[in-house]
Amino acid sequence: MKLLVYPGSFDPVTNGHMDIIERASKICDKLIVAVLVNHGKTPVFTMEERTMLLKKAIGDRENIEVCSFSGLLVDFMKRINARTIIKGLRAVSDFEYEMQMALLNRKLDNEIDTLFMMTSINNSFLSSSVVRELARNGAGVEDYVPHSIAPYIYEKFKKAGV
Ligand code: PNS
């Protein structure tokens, strides 16, 4: 079975992530979307919230599963017996960090490979931090995140004042 793992912090999931999820799910038997901790970032949404928002955005899809894990990506992959990571690339600016991660993960486990998929051009400017910044300042995010999750994003920023 061709298993792909799409890891990220998804704080929150955006239409850019959804585009990769849609397209990646068509080139594998099963896509595991893995919510992980990026120690370089302080998330606004909890792990549970990020996982819930992803599940809501994806809905009931036979070959897509959403999981969360708090250790190393390679350990998660080993646990589920997966060998291939898929990541989205928006621009050359993403490349350096993603190459470092891909090489590091292969150094940690030489059976693991990373594939890259180019984000669609209309999402190339989009990121979770852009969505957070818009929501924090009271601007609409409906064009940038799945419609089903926009209300949760507004609610979070209204409640927490983050
Ligand atoms: O969406 P992001 O923040 O670019 O995703 C990065 C993520 C979460 C995939 C990456 O930080 C990660 O793999 N975290 C888990 C811990 C890990 O394995 N780190 C890499 C080796 S130090």
Image: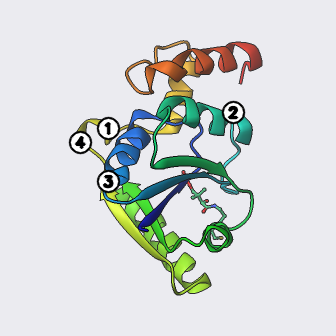
Crowding at label 1, few (<14), some or many (≥20) Cα neighbours within 10 Å? some
Residue type, label 1? Asn
Spot occupied by residue 140 in the image (x, y as percentages of width and height)? 46, 14
Reading the image, the residue beneath label 4 is 121
User: Which is closer to the viewer, label 2 or label 3?
Assistant: 2
Quadrant position of residue 54: top right
Tell me: is circle 2 under 8 Å from ligand 1.
no
Spot occupied by residue 16 in the image (x, y as percentages of width and height)? 38, 40
Residue type, label 2? Glu
* First reached walking from the N terminus: tag 4 or tag 2: 2
Q: What element carries label 2?
A: helix
Reading the image, the residue beneath label 1 is 123
User: Which is closer to the viewer, label 1 or label 3?
Assistant: 1
Tell me: is circle 1 under 8 Å from ligand 1.
no
Q: Do the residues labelled 4 and 2 touch (CB within 8 Å)?
A: no
Q: Are marks 4 and 3 in contact (CB under 8 Å)?
A: no
Q: What element carries label 3?
A: loop
Give how far apart the Cα atoms at labels 1 and 2 are: 23 Å
Q: Horizontal placement of 143 versus 64: left or right?
A: left
Check the image and report above or below for 153 versus 50: above
Q: Are marks 1 and 3 in contact (CB under 8 Å)?
A: no
Asked whether 116 or 58 is in front, the reply is 58
